[in-house]
Amino acid sequence: MIIGKLKDLNLYKGLSKNIDKAIDYAISTDLLSLAAGKYEIDGKNIYVNRQSYIGKPLADCAAENHKDYLDLQIVLKGTEGFGYADISNNTLNLIEPYNKEKDVTKYTCIDETIYTMTMGSFAILFPEDIHRPQIKINDSTVEKAVIKIKI
C-alpha cells in the first residue's frame, strides 16, 4: 500500500502506463464535481467509482482485496477510517471467496492498522493489500473517488 496526500500523487508515476493514466486523470479532473456513479477513463482498463456515503461501524465494514485491479482511493471531502493488513496477516479469516465478476475477496481481520483518511488523502492498493474502507469516524458525509486500475 502507498498512502499519502494528493499533492504528492505525481511521485508515483512510472510504475505502469495504467497507473500513470489514472494519476493524470486524478490530478486533472475535478473529481468532487462528478455525481456518484461509474465513469470510464480508458474502457475497462481504468475507471472511477465516485462515491458519497456516511461511514459505517468497524464491525459492518468487511476487509477486502482485489486480483485484477489496483485501487487508487481518494478522499475528496470528509473523514473516514481505513483499515490495512498485509495478505500474510495470520488474523485474516476468509468470509467470501474470490468473486471474479466483482474482483473481490472478503475477510475478517483482528490485527490491522486503522488510518484516518481526510480530505486530500489517497491510498494505492495492490493485491496483497487487505483494506477496510468506509469506517465511521464521525457523522459527516464522505465524498470519495475509487479509481480502478487494471493490472
Image: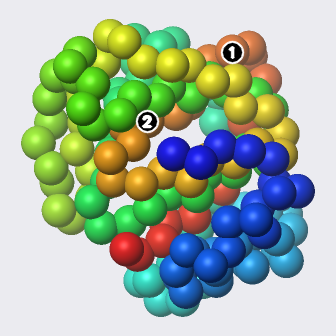
Residue at image coords 57%, 28%: 82
Above or below: residue 30 compared with residue 43: above
Above or below: residue 131 compared with residue 43: above
* Label 2 residue SS: strand
Across and down, in percent, residue 10 comes to: 78, 68
* Colour theme: rainbow
Residue at image coords 44%, 62%: 70
Do we see residue 47 in this rendering?
no
Across and down, in percent, residue 138 comes to: 74, 14
| Residue type highlighted by circle 2 | His
Left or right: residue 18 versus residue 95 is right
Mark 1 vs 2, N-terminal side:
2
Residue 6 sits in quarter: bottom right
Number of disc labels: 2
Q: Which of 27 and 57 is in front in this view?
A: 27
Q: Which mark is residue 131?
A: 2
Across and down, in percent, residue 31 comes to: 79, 64
Left or right: residue 102 versus residue 125 is left
Circles 1, 2 touching at the beta carbon (< 8 Å): no
Q: Mark 1 points at which residue?
A: 137
Above or below: residue 3 compared with residue 100: above
Residue at image coords 41%, 83%: 44
Do we see residue 88 in this rendering?
yes
Q: How far apart are marks 1 and 2 (CA)?
A: 16 Å
| Residue type highlighted by circle 1 | Ile
Residue at image coords 23%, 15%: 91
* Label 1 residue SS: loop
Q: Nearer the viewer, residue 41 or 2?
A: 2
Instruction: Tell me the crowding category of disc 1: few under 14, some 14 to 19, or many 20 or more residues within 10 angstroms, Cα based.
Output: some
